[in-house]
Image (tube, helix red, strand yellow):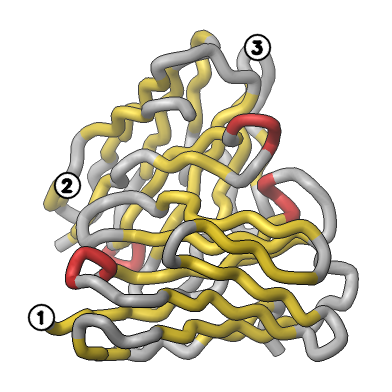
Amino acid sequence: QKEVEQDPGPLSVPEGAIVSLNCTYSNSAFQYFMWYRQYSRKGPELLMYTYSSGNKEDGRFTAQVDKSSKYISLFIRDSQPSDSATYLCAMSAKTGANNLFFGTGTRLTVIP
Amino acid sequence: SAVISQKPSRDICQRGTSLTIQCQVDSQVTMMFWYRQQPGQSLTLIATANQGSEATYESGFVIDKFPISRPNLTFSTLTVSNMSPEDSSIYLCSVEGQRNYGYTFGSGTRLTVV
């Protein structure tokens, strides 16, 4: 079983829709949770960072962590064509790149 | 956050040859990280490059295949040696973000081995 599972999509939504992206994980020790956005031919860029459980909101983006279910989500409100990218979840039990586990990414297309 | 310049951005190479990828950061950083991103697979850490010491390799990666240099606090290179088609991938350089929040990545090197 992989440490982190993420539906690869692809996911296509109309402009203005609410997008829900999800990851599940198996290691209950994970406490640092991240979402990265990766545009085509670019490196991943950090979008959201959450420690432990709860919600975090930043503009149109909301990250949710449910540790009891080992499930994290990223919601995008009022989606825009510029949100079209691959979204990667990542998580770790402690700091350090060698402790970080990435999902495979979900490819999102927002159709004008 | 740091700005990372990585080159080449892409290359097509013959099997059996080697390619050196360069990573330049606009600020001094203690550690630099090299990742591989294969289609349909998650980002995988190859090694951590520390200035003044040997790189630390993750399980499944060896120095003979992926030699790394780290001559100063702003620069590192990764060489992919004796390439085979299985080495076709995107290779990414990364550094820690501010206050250890996440990581900053370069734009990547898209390598195709034929």
Is mark 1 in CB contact (under 8 Å) with mark 3? no
Q: Chain of mark 3?
A: B
Labels 2 and 3 touching (C-beta < 8 A): no
Q: Is residue A2 left or right of residue B22?
A: right
Residue B10, labelled with which disc?
A: 2
At label 1, counting other C-alpha atoms closer than 10 Å, the crowd grade (few under 14, some 14-19, many 20 or more) is few
- Element at badge 3? loop
Q: Are marks 1 and 2 in contact (CB under 8 Å)?
A: no
Disc 3 crowd rating (10 Å Cα; few below 14, some 14-19, many 20+) is few
Q: Residue at x 24, y 44 (%)?
A: B17
Which residue carries the number 1 mark?
Answer: A112
In this figure, what is the number of numbered marks?
A: 3
Q: Position of residue B108 (x, y in %)?
A: 31, 46
**Chain under numbered label 1:** A
Q: Mark 2, residues whose alpha carbon is within 10 Å: few (<14), some, or many (≥20)?
A: some
Callouts 2 and 3 in the same chain? yes
Q: Is residue A1 above or below residue A51?
A: below
The kind of residue tagged 1 is Pro
Where is residue A58? Give x, y as percent. Answer: 52, 57
Residue ID at (55%, 30%): B32
State the image coordinates of residue B7 (x, y, percent, origin top left): 24, 33
The C terminus of chain B sits in image quarter:
bottom left
Distance from Cα at disc 2 to Cα at disc 3: 29 Å
Q: CA distance from mark 1 to mark 2?
A: 30 Å
Q: Nearer the viewer, residue A98 or A108?
A: A108
Q: Is residue B74 left or right of residue A53?
A: left
The amino acid on which the numbered mark 2 sits, given as a three-letter code, is Arg
* Relative vertical location of residue B5 with respect to residue A56 in this rendering, above or below: above
Q: Which mark is residue B34?
A: none
Residue A24, x across and y down, in percent: 67, 85
Q: Secondary structure at mark 1?
A: loop
Instruction: Look at mark 3 in the image and give the residue it sits on.
Output: B52
